[in-house]
Structures are given as structure tokens and as C-alpha cells.
Amino acid sequence: MELTDFLNIPPYHLNSTQKRELLNEYLGQLTRYHYQNCEPYKKMLDAYGFDISANAGYEAIPFLPVRLFKLFDLLSIPKSEVVKTMTSSGTTGQQVSKIFLDKDTAANQTKVLTKIVSSVIGKQRVPMIIIDSESVLKDRNMFSARGAGILGFSMFGAKRIYALNENMELNTDGICEFLENHKGERIFLFGFTFMIWQHFYKELVAKKIKLDLSNGVLIHGGGWKKLAAESISSAEFKQKLNQVCGINNVHDYYGMVEQTGSIYMECEAGYLHASVFSDVVIRRATDFSIARVGERGIIQVVSVLPKSYPGHSLLTEDEGMLMGEDNCPCGRKGKYFKIVGRLQNAEIRGCSDVYATKF
Amino acid sequence: MFMQQNFNEVTCVFPRKFEENLLLAQKASMPFDNMAVQFLDALSKQLNTDINIRQYPDVATFAFFCRKANIFNLKKLYDTNEGLRLGRGIVFHVAPSNVPVNFAYSLISGILSGNINIVRVPSKEFEQVQMICRAIEKVAENDQFMEMGNRMLLVKYPRESQATKYFSSICDVRVIWGGDQTIADIRRNQLPARSFDVTFADRYSFCVINADELVHGINLERLAQGFYNDTYLFDQNACTAPHLVVWLGENKNVEKARQMFWDSLSDLVEKKYNFQAVMAVDKLTAFYSQAIKSDRKIKAEGNSNNLWRVQIDTLPVTIDEFRCTGGYFSEYHAQSLDEIAPIINRKYQTLAYYGLTKKAIETFIKTATPVGLDRIVPIGQTSEFSLIWDGYNLITTFSRDIDI
């Protein structure tokens, strides 16, 4: 089975039986590929006691904690074939994940992202407002998940404008002019949830400016940690944005640098959806067994994309809840779920430095 | 100097106000001086009047340690080669932030060795810390012990504070608990020329169980409870907590003993341990890291993230790197004690044992003469405080031998 077989399937059309059959076969194949091409991966699977010859189904494939990509260089290709190394946006001093991409994997990430995003904004490229500063791309130190996200989504924009200057100040004149020039057209907006809130929404409120983005589609991601601290819910976020710019088409997405491309897009009903290219499995922390629908657990993500590195089955550090499969009110097939939040850092007793002793 | 610097962020826990001149004017005293012993005994009694003490076994243990009978017993150990000794002067203790009662043991070692003591207590709000500080305050109100109260200062302050710099500049001995990073941070603050540090760094501990004895042992539950206290009670993050379990004995006994021991421990952990979800991820990460870094195949056993057991069939010298908090153990079946000699490096602190004689271990240590290992105690006693800690005799270390 080839990855191209997947690429021709519409992202949300397969029911659970059809999807499972495809994932079992292709992810099983990927597991064998990485086992043969990545020595550390082989050691992990051997230690786990995984029988590589048995085809037990994709949920039985061991999941690697994403933290391992911070601790080890994990790749299934010769280093000479690496065309791009993606890093996670760790804060200063923290170790960052390193994800090694070859030409094919990078190209496939783009293809899959296109499929998923065009299901929300349409197949045509449209004028795009990036709610961030262009300096994110210029600064090599900052070029990480945030820069990669902007670059990845920029391909959907026909004309592009960055809404913030290098001091993260809102360029209202530029935006008004841009909107004037593209009156009546659909406008695509992209940014990171907290940036939008802090530097776009709050600025519009402070400056008492109303924009007309009733034709706009906003895609945003990056997590709710900071907004949760301000007690802003997803519903409130949408409602407030609507008040300042009339936008009513807003989609959060869930994704990570370790599985770029196969992101989980929020539907009209407010749930995140797994496309045919990936899936989530919610696992109980106590024994990693699979949680029931509506039961909170640690999110495992699988994706058909990672070929240059063994990242097709990962355990995140996020908690989530499966809400159902194939029966979301929005009409999309596949699993739909909610994010509960980041796993809490453990409160650890004992005389040792907690963080220093952790690996 | 302290007053001039105006350390706003410093909270004086005891006394409520820091009288710098009064503290600096204090003199050294003799180890186990009568006043000190009386004070600790009064502290012990005061703590026992606290109705909450039953909820805090660590405070109860501390109170028990402080009673006169125990202190006199300890004193005897020092009486044998009595010369002329006096405390070194001011001991500045930086206590670990995650263990509530440790500060108090550090303090009393400073008191018993004849010193004036400044203690940085954990900034986290532990009820145990408050109980002990309240008791000290109460006892020091007594005229008889006012002098003792003048000889100590208990403070709380944030990590970034300049107070560390100040206290370091006036102390004769600085005692740093809390691991390598804390030690490096605190050491950026200079000490006076004659002063020195006593540091309790990150250490590695392990245990040895003789399966031939265990299979006949009748006290399995007590052993499991002891092991639980050694490990889970402090999230397997105390320097004394074993991370490696070495089995000795015949194959069939080891097999049986393992089963008995882990089943018994697992029951306890299931009942008592407050498992946190992120620990599941931590342990899986530790396991895969160990798999990648090991030359030989390793294998995990068990079916709950509460308790991870990793079987290894060789004992690599790097075994001390493979550790995790919250219940993660490597297990190895050794043919004899001699097999573990090569792995013991400077990081090794405590060896806990079961089913071996003290004599056998003593012989092993005398033959192997490792650079590591400072404590050898039965399983269940690893976290019991002793005036000999990490290879230091705290009383002699904190005091001066006066040549006369």
C-alpha cells in the first residue's frame, strides 16, 4: 500500500470500519519500515516486546512519548537525505524536539495539510491576514513551530499581509486598506490563539476599532493554556471576536510539530476531528488501556505521514476526551474529540531537584 | 548589614523579627550541651501536645528523635573519645524544598554540635513545617530556653533573593540539601575564607534482596511496607530511595520471591499511592530511553503504570542513569554481591538490604572498597535520619577539635 492511496481520499468521508482497515494496513507497514530503518526504534519495540510480524491492528502499535524526540535524534533515513529539521517552540533553556524531514515526507505534509484546510476555506487561494509578525520568520531562533505554522498555512493565501509589526503592534491602517482592496472576497485569517487574543482582539477593543470580517474564515491553533489562565473559553473567544470584527467562521486546530500536516480541525459543532490521514486514541493513565467515549485520558496520535522519522504513533502530553465517531452533528465521519489540557507537572516530594533529575 | 540591605522578601518564621546583632553576638557551645538536650526534649514534648501530630507521622518521628533518652544514647557515641570540642559558630542550612521535616533534622544537628543556626525552611506551605516552627516558638517563650531561641533564625525567602548571599557571608558552615543544581546555584555565593560547605548532592540508591531468605520469610507485608516507605512515600525522589533491585539466591527462589514481593508491594501502591497521570508518560519515556541506551535487550513487567519493573540481564555501569520518579525499578538477578562491585560509583549513597547479615555486607565492602556507598541499612530504614549522613559525621563536621 502506498501513501498516495490515502491522498486521493477526501479527508472526512470514510466510516470507522473502512478507515480502520486502511490504517491497520498502512501503519503496520510503516511500523515495519521504521523497525528496519531506525535502530533506536527497533530497540524500543524489542524492549516493549512488540511482535513485528503479527498484524495486530494500529491501536496495538507502541506509541513513543513525544519527549523522546527531545532526548534522541530519531530518524529512519540517512542524515544526508534530511532536507529540513523542524523544532518545537520550547522556551529558553528547554530542550526542543527535533523532527527530521526528507523531501517526500515534507511534500506529503503539505499535501495533507492542503486537503484538510481546503475543506474549511475552499480550494481557491484567497487573500490572507496573518495575525503575527513577519519577524517570526526572519529570526532564526524563533523559527520553530510558530514559524513553520505560518509558512505552512501561507500557501493558502493569494495575497498576504502580516497584521502585527516587529513590536507586535497591530497595523490597523494596513489591515483596513487590505480589506478595502478585497471587499466582497473571502478572507482567510491565521494565527496563534493567544496572539490573536492579546494583540488582535484586545487591541481592537482598546482602540475602539470595528473591522468587517463577516466574510472571513479564521484558523487558529497553539493551545489554550494562556487563555485558560484568563478564564476565556472557546465559545467566549468566538463570541468576542465576532463582536469586534463580525467574523463567524472560526476554527481551532490541534496539531504538533511531531506530526505536522495531519492536523485536527475544529468543526462547526466545536469538536476537533480526525481526518482519514490520522487518528486519536485516548488512553487511561493508569495502564494505557483505551478509554471509553467521554472518559478523560492521555491523547495518543497516529498519522500516516511520518516516514523519515519514527513518529507515526505518539503519546502526547495532552489530555483529551473522545466524544464519538462517525456521528458528529457537523456531518463529518471519523472520530471527534475535545482537548482537556496539558498534563499537569507532577508534584513530587523528595530531596532531589525535581527537574534536574528528570532525565 | 542585613538591616541596611532591607530584604523585604525574607519572612522570619522564628523569631518573628531578626535581631542581627543579637544573633551575631552568640557564642559557640559544646556538643550535646545540657541546655541543648533539654531544649530538644522540651520541643519533643511540645510537639506531642499538638493534636494534629497523629496525622503527620514524619513529625511524630521527629518528636520521637528529639526526646532526651534518644539524644543521650546518641551522645554516648561521642563520649568515648571526648576531647575538647566546640561548635564551629554559625551554621547556615539550606533545606530541600520538597521534604517538609528535613529542615528540622538539619537544625538539630546544628544545635547538638554546638552552633548558632540559620535555616532556610521550605517556602512551600507545609503543615509539618508550621507545626515544628510553632512548637519551637512556644518552647523558646519559656525563660529557661530564651537563650536557645536567640541562637537560631528560621527564614523563608524566594530562590532569587540576595539573602543567600548575606547568610553565606556570615556563616562558618553552609549546609546545602537539595541536589546538584541547587548546590551549584547556592555556591555562586561566596563564603568567608575559613568557612566550608557540607553538601548533600543528588545520589543514587539501590537495594539487595536475598530471595533464599524471602521465600521463607514470614513478614512479607512488613518488608513491602518498608520498601514502600523507602520509595513511594517520597515519590522515589529522595536520594535514599532505591531505583535498582538486585536479587540474590537460587533461580527458583528468585522467581518465587519476585512474585511474592511485587504482588505485595503492588497491593500497597494500589491502595495508598497518589498516582499522577503525567507519571505514566515519564515512566514510558524512561523505559524507552533505557532501551535505546542499553546494549542488551531489556524487558518491562507488570500491567499498571503505578509500578514499572524493568528486567535487565546484565548490570551496566551506567545503570544509575536509568531512573524515574514515582515507581520505576530496574531488576537484576546477581550470582553474588561481588557482581555489583563494578557499578558502585561516587553517586551511590544508600544500600538497603533484606535477608543478608551485616557481616556479609561488611566483608563485601571491605573487599570491594568502592568510592561510593555511604549508608547500608535494612529495607524500610533508608529515610530514617541519622547524625551520620552521606558519609559525614554531622556532629564532628559541625564542630572543632581544640588541641590542648
Image (cartoon, coloured by chain):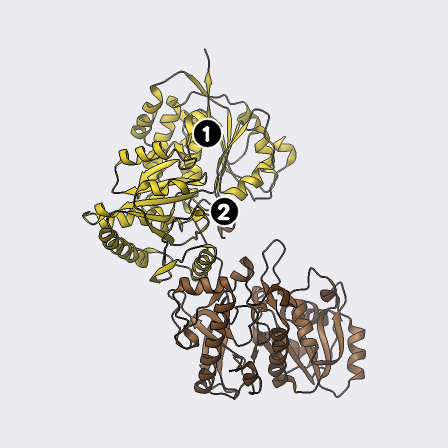
Chain colours: A brown, B yellow
Residue A135 appears in the figure: yes
Give the quadrant of the N terminus of chain B.
Answer: top right
Give the quadrant of the C terminus of chain B.
Answer: top left
Where does residue A2 sit, x and y in percent of width and height?
54, 82
Where does residue B185 sit, x and y in percent of width and height?
58, 41
**Badge 1 and badge 2 both on one subunit:** no
Tell me the kind of residue under disc 1.
Gly
The residue to which callout 1 is attached is B149
* In the foreground, B240 or B35: B240
**Disc 1 + disc 2, Cβ < 8 Å:** no
- The crowd level at tag 1 (other Cα within 10 Å; few <14, some 14-19, many 20+) is many
The residue to which callout 2 is attached is A353
B191, above or below A72, in the image: above
> Image check: A111 left or right of B41?
right
**What residue is drawn where x is 69% and y is 78%?**
A189
> Image check: B397 left or right of B11?
left
The numbered dot on residue B68 is: none
**What residue is drawn where x is 37% and y is 30%?**
B40
Tell me the kind of residue under disc 2.
Asp
Where does residue A325 sit, x and y in percent of width and height?
45, 83
The chain under label 1 reads B
User: Element type at marker 1?
Assistant: helix
* In the foreground, B340 or A223: B340
* In the foreground, B218 or A190: B218
